[in-house]
Amino acid sequence: MVTGTLLSSPVERAARTASKRQALLRFLRKNYYTSAEIAGMVMGIASRQGVHTTLAAMERDDMLRRETVEANGRKWTLWGITAHGQALAFNPDAGEQPESKYFEAGRVGLTVLAHTLDLQRISIQVERAGWTDWKLGDRLEKWQANVSRPDALATSPQGNLVAIECERTIKTVKRYEAVLADRLQAIKRGQFQRCVWLCPTHELSTRLQTIITSIKDVVVAGSRVPIQERHLSLLAFGGYEYLLQTIGE
């Protein structure tokens, strides 16, 4: 008599593999490329070997292509979606249309690569925390002229639309004055309800919070407008591991 957990059947294993592949294709439908580490997060594969085996198989089947680039003082191996992969990534039964863009070698923005990948990690984190409707800022339409766009927008579990800023390094106070003015005006226009700045570490986020909350006034339409406590209450700060479900309550 056989006891213990039964091994899954070939049909079940094939279904799980197909599900993991589809999850990655859906992720790359809008992101176009990613790293092996992030691909593993998306597919729910913990082992490095398992991730690379799946990625290599998808490359063999013309769903993905890879490219090694140098940026930020290190080499990165990127995995991007092909035209064939895009054809498999959308859901025609849900009325979706295929994406025309796909990963092209030599077309990666190297100066913002680390920032782009960090935003991908954050998008996975917020989705798992119950957030929805993640949209990258550079893909937003109908934005106010001459006003900077947030890195991303997402809807919190409480139903609030929140602007998300990914800050890997600290910029000048003058730059933050301009960004703060843009974000507060956008909130006033109703484009989102709150803004959160996320940094790689809690220590860096604390320093950023001190810098931004020490700003006393900003320029709006050529005039200096004082920053009040009610403005600061619309902002939040944290490391990448910050529990985003607490924002927007």
Image (tube, rainbow, N blue to C red):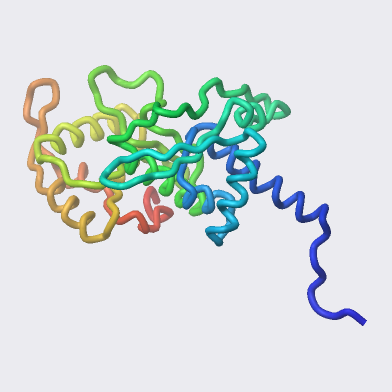
Looking at the rendering, which quadrant does residue 71 occupy?
Answer: top left
Of residue 87 and residue 79, the one placed in the foreground of this image is: 79
Would residue 152 be found to the left or right of residue 55 on screen? left
| Position of residue 205 measured from the top left corner of the image (x, y, whole percent) | 23, 54
Q: Is residue 157 visible?
A: no
Would residue 192 be found to the left or right of residue 72 on screen? right
In the rendered view, tell whether residue 110 sits above or below residue 96.
Answer: below
Looking at the rendering, which quadrant does residue 139 occupy?
Answer: top left
Quarter of the image where the N terminus is located: bottom right
Of residue 62 and residue 245, the one placed in the foreground of this image is: 62
Would residue 39 be found to the left or right of residue 238 on screen? right
Q: How many discs mark residues in the rendered view?
A: 0
In the rendered view, tell whether residue 94 sits above or below residue 212.
Answer: above
Looking at the rendering, which quadrant does residue 206 occupy?
Answer: bottom left
Q: Which residue does the image show at 56% across and 58% down from the upper left?
A: 49
| Position of residue 116 measured from the top left corner of the image (x, y, whole percent) | 37, 39
Q: Most extreme residue toward the right, as rendered?
A: 1
Of residue 44 and residue 85, the one placed in the foreground of this image is: 85
| Position of residue 54 measured from the top left corner of the image (x, y, whole percent) | 62, 49
Would residue 112 be found to the left or right of residue 97 on screen? left
| Position of residue 21 measured from the top left corner of the image (x, y, whole percent) | 64, 44
Of residue 5 and residue 138, the one placed in the foreground of this image is: 5
Q: Which residue does the image show at 62% across and 22% down from the upper left?
A: 97
Q: Is residue 53 visible?
A: yes
